[in-house]
Image: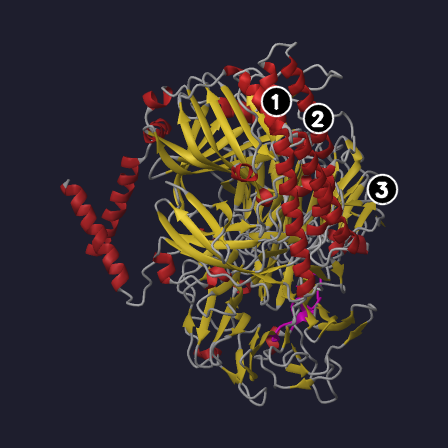
Amino acid sequence: MKKVTLILMVLFLAVSFTNLFALTVDEIIEKNIEAKGGKERLEAVKATKATGKLFAMGGMEAPFVMYHKRPNNYRFEATIQGMSMVQAYDGETAWNIMPWTGSTEPQKASDMQAQTVKQQADMDGLLLNYKDKGYKIELIGKEDMEGTEVYHLRLSNLGMLEGMTIDMYLDAEYFLEIKQTMKGKYEGQDFDVTTVMGDYKEVDSMMMAHSIDVQMGGQTVSTLSMDKIEINPEINDSIFKMPVKEEKTTEKKEPEGK
Amino acid sequence: MRFLLSLAAILCLSTGTLFSADSTATEYKVGSYLFGALRAREIGPAVMGGRVSAMDVVSSDRRIIWVGAAGGGVWKSVDNGTSFDPVFDKYTQSIGSIAIDQKRPDTVWVGTGEPWVRNSVSVGTGIYKTTNGGDDWKLMGLEKSERIGKIIIDPRSPDTVYAAVLGHLWNANEERGLYKTEDGGETWEKILYIDENTGCTDIAIDPQEPDIIYAAMWQFRREPYFFTSGGPGSGLHKSTDGGKTWTKLTKGLPTGELGRIAIAVAPSRPSLLYAVVESEKTALYRSEDLGETWIRKSDAQAVNGRPFYFGLIVVDPQDYNRIYKPATMLSISRDGGETFTTSFGGVHPDHHALWIDPNDPNYVLTGTDGGIYISFDRAGSFRFLNNLPISQFYHVSCDQQQPYNIYGGLQDNGQWMGPSQSPGGIEGKDWQSIGFGDGFYTFADPTDNNVVFWEYQGGKIYRKDMKTGEQKNIQPQPGGNDPDYRFNWDTPIALSPNNPGTIYIGSQFLFRSSDRGDSWERISGDLTTNDPKKQRQEESGGLTVDNTTAENHCTIFAIAESPLDGNVIWVGTDDGNVQVTENGGGSWKNVVGNIDGLPKATWCSSIEPSHFDRATAYAAFDGHQTGDMTPYLFRTTDMGRTWESLSNDSLIGYCHVIREDLENPNLLFAGTEFGLFASVDGGRQWVHYKEDFPKVSIRDLVIQPDESDLVIGTHGRGIYIIDDISPLRQITPEVLASDVYIFDAEPYVMRSRGGGMQFSGSAEFVGDNPSEVAKIAYYLKKRHLFGDMKFEIFDSEGKLVKTLPGSKRKGINRIDWQMRLKPPKVPPAKTLAYQALEGPLAAEGVYTVKMTKGKSTYTGRIELAADPNSPHSAEDRALQHKTVMRLYRMQERLAYVAEAIKDARDQANDRAEKLKKKDGLRKELEKFSDKLTDLHETLVITEEVQGIPGVEKLREKVVNLYGNVIGYWGKPTDDQLKRIPVLDGKIDEAKNKFETITADLENLNTKLEKKKLDKITLLTREEFDKRD
């Protein structure tokens, strides 16, 4: 009899504990913002420049530099065999330079690519000030993900392609983002892309991920490994704008600059 | 605070008691995370499909097809069957019914548990619902129903749903009959119930007046050795008030006991109904007055064949006289059921699901034991969708070829063999059909891979010559004084691990052959209980006799010879015996009585003698055919005298197979009806392997010894392979307790593989290949979150060869090393030099791996070894490597020369810019620059041209030669070798020209100095090398 009471009591306490500690979406996000340095600190960042190496499937690696500048400018540039691969956005136009297509001319990004680039360009990330952007965030639950306890959030109404959602997983102990899966439809077919964040390091009183894996179909297709993140560097806005095509001339070209 | 303290005390106390209760209890707990990166790859095959049990299609958009497989879960296509995705992997894979809410097509109901109750049928766990097209599912109850045959949604209010619950197949239960919910599945009411032995198999609803419902009730029961269809519970019922009250329909229907009934309302005239009624004389019945009276129509074989397996009838949506009868063959009546003709079109027999487009009745989908077929001409001709990997394997085996092949037998799809890898992935064309019938054990003869043993149901064993295709029946035959041999549906065949070429087969007796089945020696008496009550298969079936060998009983079901002693042979029988001989069959001992906790007569599903100890063996038992779903696993270490149970709460599903690892006796694998389990501590704890792996029935497991791969035979999802399980072999409590552990790896054998070219669109199922690169495997006790995580690989001289980012999850991680050095530097140009994106292959030998995790470092090693089967001699390989490295250096030298030219030219231009246009020095600098530009243009492509210019400059010539030489791991051709000095000479030439142009640089620099401009300095090789 005594034993039964004891078990019941433990059960009761466990239940009330869960209630005690059950967090709402906003409390979880608040803790996430705190863990990353706090709202004030994060908003004080006007621009960043990250440098490092891009590791792609098949053993390829390329140095890269990634710029962010408020309100929503973004440029990613990786170099292979001295050629630049660029993905950029100036708040209006998302564009690319994709040398492997046989051309080094800048091209407008497809509507699909533009989605991710626009999202990338938001320096707040997905969680900070999410209500102002009209995002909806739902707590799916506290669950086990690959053996780690996480808060599973689902973001929708992202102003992206129709029906697109992002499932985000925050480490339940430290409240930092460790994984997110973007799901959507394109031409009727489902697609999903997963991003894994890690190697968090302190930069100017902020906690920032220094490693980002992109996974498709469970396989890591690329890893961005950041050596250095500079806070508020001088960045000329022109690098975010899509260059105007040069007129072809028969004259000898200007020597290529650095 | 005091409250918290007392809580802590309670928790401590209770955990303390838990552990002290059993002094041998493990101090650690492992979970599914442990497997981590040891992901299983799905290799199909899909070429023969597998049993489809249910189907529904969005009626307003027939591109959206939902398929329920008998054992392979739920699949969704959004492109008219061009491709399918599994959407139900976390849940029970045996599907009974699917219903799309046609008003809200993202809402779909799935009833689990197949209703076509053959001997090998699986079990369900309730009814599930998605409201977002299959992304998320919720269990909506009826958990104990075991099988749900049909779901119908009220067309007026989609939260009103009817579920026809067959209930348990092997025992009585009360959760069966017709259920109804009016709140979207939150609550269910049982609206029609006969008794605990009778379920509801089929329902039909009047589309115009949906309160009129017809329900077919069926009394049925299966035993391990007998099946009964029919009884007083069976009957056809009708309600006109949404299920509140019911009337039994009898007018015109057969008197006497009924069996399974299929019912359909004609959509174009709902007063007209058809029913196939199993009785003493099974026939099709037709009613023209809302079911009140019935008129007997055809009783042709097309209608009355195997009612328990084909309880389905479908009426054309626009022509009420056109009826489809899915059965062994698909038959069609065009005259309201008077006569039937059989549709052909090369379709796999055994039709269980059929859908006709209500807006275009030419379009017909049929689901069979061999997958899905589409017809565009009312079932006149069919196109097969060969992209559903839902094959149901009973057994798998591997050979020891390189790469190895996998063999197996499948439910109603014969026996197949296919490679464990193939260029571009494993496709339908890679699989080869071996025999016919229902397939079971299939093996290549270990002494001659060209010889394959295979069987179909009831022990019909064949030996096939794979080159000629000729096959010989080698089944043992009874002699004059012998009783008839009883062979199980799934008759065991075993190879001797000690004497390659020796094989065993079991009826009630055990037979051994050492001449590939040309002669057999009987090496036992009857090893079963030989209970005559369990040998009535000729009477089995109930109202319709169905003796297909599926109910053969009192037979041997498992045979295994000890790998340590060929005289020790274990046998398990379907009627619950475990027999062992220690003298090669001279005498046998039944040891099953020594197993405590095992109910009598429980089917022995698998026996695994240990690879480490002659007296140790493992046994799995499966009581599901008596309604006992408990997992039973046992181990003996004394030849069966005593047994210990290895089952506990961490196992779910009844057990089909247990395997012991070939190297670590503590590593065990078990396959149950609900998935794959592993134990790293000899069976104390079982871990469910479920990340990215369906909850599918696992019937067989085999470890391929050369590759250490675990090959998984599923009954519903084809074959999966977990490549290289060696990290699991190294798991110990110490490893689990360490923060980081880098696993040892066998030397990685570098193999050159071929390629090809194929563009098969989206419709082809392509099984994954293993990754062909070296791997570094490590364990992390906790997910890595803070600080760096990287790997550096050093060669034997301590030179850094490669840096790799690390993966961070808890459990086993595995990262790829392509075994290549950095790609060569090439001169920048206007195009990419694709072949130079790949670095040279790393040399054979031992490499040191340094792992950095935050502030800590850890060291491991990795070894690259040559392929012992390589057709190339060590000298040829060395020559290839030497040539590659020479071309590697040539590219770098060319890159340097081109860069030095460009660098000097850019400096000249820079100085010129600073001078007045008419300045003589400016002109001189421009001339100097032009010469350099001309020279640079001979080396690299500097202009971007629209189209495919196909220009080759010196860079392209060197890079192409490099690409051709690294692509072949043997001796380069003479022409390639001769080409090297030619191209090398051209680099020298360019360098010389550069030196000539810059010979007078001092003079130019003096003039620059006079103008107070910076001198032009030439880039040195050292400076160049320092650039990244």
Q: Which amino acid is tagged 3? A: Arg
Label 2 residue SS: helix
Q: Does residue A46 appear anywhere in the picture?
A: yes
Q: Does residue A145 appear anywhere in the picture?
A: no
Relative to the observer, which residue lies in front, B449 or B932?
A: B932
Left or right for A118, reference B715: left
Relative to the observer, which residue lies in front, B709 or B920?
A: B920
Query: Label 3 near label 1: C-beta < 8 Å?
Result: no
Say if labels 3 and 2 share a chain.
yes
Quick check: B805 above or below B503?
A: above
Residue farthest to the left?
B2
Quick check: B460 above or below B847?
A: below
Mark 1 = which residue? Answer: B908
Q: Which amino acid is tagged 1? A: Ala
Q: Which amino acid is tagged 2? A: Lys
Q: Which of the chains bears the disc numbered 3?
A: B
Q: Which residues are magenta?
A: B536-556
Toward which corner of the image does residue A139 lie, by quadrant?
top left
Say the numbered circle drawn on residue B133.
none
Q: Where residue B157 sits in the image (x, y, percent)?
A: 57, 28
Task: State which tag comes first along the sequence, 1 or 2.
Answer: 1
Q: Specify the quadrant that holds the N terminus of chain B.
A: top left
Label 1 residue SS: helix
Mark 3: few, some, or many residues within 10 Å (few <14, many ≥20)? some
Mark 3 = which residue? Answer: B334
